[in-house]
Amino acid sequence: MKHLFLIVCSFTMIISCQKTPKEATDVKPKSPFVWEAANLYFLLTDRFNNGDTANDINFERTKETGKLRGFKGGDLKGITQKIEEGYFTDLGVNAIWMTPIVEQIHGGTDEGTGVTYGFHGYWTKDWTAIDPNYGTKEDLKQLVKVAHDKGIRILLDAVINHTGPVTEQDPVWPSEWVRTEPQCQYTNYENTITCTLVKNLPDIKTESNEAVELPPQLVEKWKAEGRYEEEIAELNAFFERTGYPRAPRFYIMKWLTDYITEFGIDGYRVDTVKHTEEYVWQEFKNECDYAFKTWKQNHKNEVLDSNDFYLVGEVYGYGISSGKAYDFGDRKVNYFDDAFTSLINFELKWNVAQQSKEEVFKRYSDELHTNLKGYGILNYLSSHDDGQPFDPERTKAYETGTMLLLTPGTSQIYYGDESARSLVVDGTIGDATLRSMMNWADVKGNKVLEHWQKLGQFRVNHPAVGAGVHQMITQEPYVFYRSFSDGNFKDLVVVGLDLPKGNKTINVSEIYKDDDLLHDAYSNQDVTVKNGTVTIDSEFDMVLLEQK
């Protein structure tokens, strides 16, 4: 079902009550970057774009795999290429999150799905190395630089909960590091944390404070690569600075925060949060903050803004209705305070399907400005491991863009949402159906993409859309506004939904004065306020008005 709607007015201004509209337009500050309003693009590194075919096969990963369960060639160079081409800028994206890029297990597994390699990035073999299928450290350095030059922040994906599965090529880590049983039951706190997520996925003993030696396979690997002494020296310096015991979790924290100090990444999406003790994430936040501060001190000319390091957590099943506390059944845990900036919101797809727009928008705004004030949520309608996406066959691609990009909170575009990449692939098993290659052949002239681009650019130019306070103006027609302020910066957006094509007349008297000149960014035409209204004649379902 296609929802018709109208975004009717938006303006940004710094004025006192004595200033005239003309004076106000003369002093428009640049919109600040606000994580709570960010337009974040999530992609599987291996499935987005192949920028270097020379790195497509490594470690003899050549076995025939189940459908969409092997490496397909996507890499860091491919992402950089699309940043340089302006694909993300055109889409209004100002942050990119990619799946883990650390070196994956060399072998494959077969748990009833056909042979599967670690193309997705969540099966770590060595946290200190980038998997050659994704590229090199130089590739990552270039990607971050190019992204920052365009005002785009970069998030990597952090896994502390587990190593990769055990294969003939990938021995189990020592028992001091991991447990291999029991398997999680997910009925209470203990059997969600002190256990393996699934069979053959060794669980890091994150609760341990006992000093452990490095795994022998890692020592052997580093020596063969000629970097053992360097890695040991860095570890010695880390543990001397922090005073932490040489327990498993602190090794991994050191390795992950190196990507901050070395490359200047802006945030981490953190995997499997609820399967690890909550104090681990408070410790991780402290080390991330230290690393980010260090990077900024060492790269003063490259600092984008004063924002803190961004941590968004995957607490699987968390929804905005939970407020700050996730309920394990026998225990509630607050992952926000002293740990995460934001949590992924698993609830939006159900809200959009079952509630009115006003119910969704008002509740999200109210929660974000009361119970969750100072924190954020990351909204999505499809993702890499959610087997029940909002619109798997992409019959509601326009509505998906409308609701995702207008709902208060940070938006997470899953690669291909904007181009109607199908999430139903025949012959796949499980989550593989969600993870096909980006449909670049469908991008040129794609009307769905044009819709997402216009909404995305409007959103990125106006933090009020994602971070503002929501208030309905009229129910029929449905019109509301969002207001946002940050110091001297003020942003106001007025939105109307479910209005017809052709002539559209909207009362804007509460916002604009007669003779104010506005611009509709959707149809690219100027309009003037007359008798407290604006009338727009366009073939489109929506209007995006900005004060000229």
Image: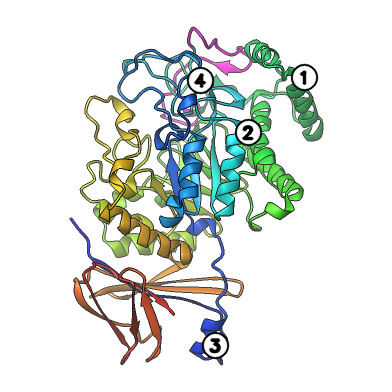
Q: Earlier in the sequence, mark 2 or mark 3?
A: 3
Secondary structure, mark 1, is: helix
Q: From the image, give the main secondary structure of the stretch colored magenta.
A: loop
Three-letter residue code for mark 2 = Leu
Q: What is the spatial separation of the Cα atoms under label 2 and label 1, in whole angstroms?
A: 19 Å
Residue 71: mark in rendering: none
In the picture shown, does residue 222 fall above or below 288? Answer: above
Three-letter residue code for mark 4 = Gly
Three-letter residue code for mark 1 = Glu
Kindly check if marks 2 and 3 are in contact, taking CB atoms under 8 A apart as contact.
no
Q: Earlier in the sequence, mark 3 or mark 4?
A: 3
In percent of width and height, residue 401 lies at 32, 55
The C terminus appears in which quarter of the rendering? bottom left
* Picture quadrant where residue 475 is located: bottom left
- What residue is pinned by disc 1? 229
In percent of width and height, residue 76 lies at 51, 36
Residue 23: mark in rendering: 3
- What residue is pinned by disc 4? 164
Q: Is residue 378 magenta?
A: no
Secondary structure, mark 4, is: loop
Q: What is the spatial separation of the Cα atoms under label 2 and label 4, in whole angstroms?
A: 16 Å
Q: Residues within 10 Å of mark 2 (few under 14, many from 20)?
A: many
Q: Residues within 10 Å of mark 4 (few under 14, many from 20)?
A: many
User: Which residue is depicted at the point 58% across and 37% down?
Assistant: 140
- In front here: 398 or 239? 398
Q: What is the spatial separation of the Cα atoms under label 2 and label 3, in whole angstroms?
A: 49 Å
User: Which residue is depicted at the point 71% across and 15% down?
Assistant: 213
Q: Earlier in the sequence, mark 3 or mark 1?
A: 3
Secondary structure, mark 2, is: helix
Residue 256: mark in rendering: 2
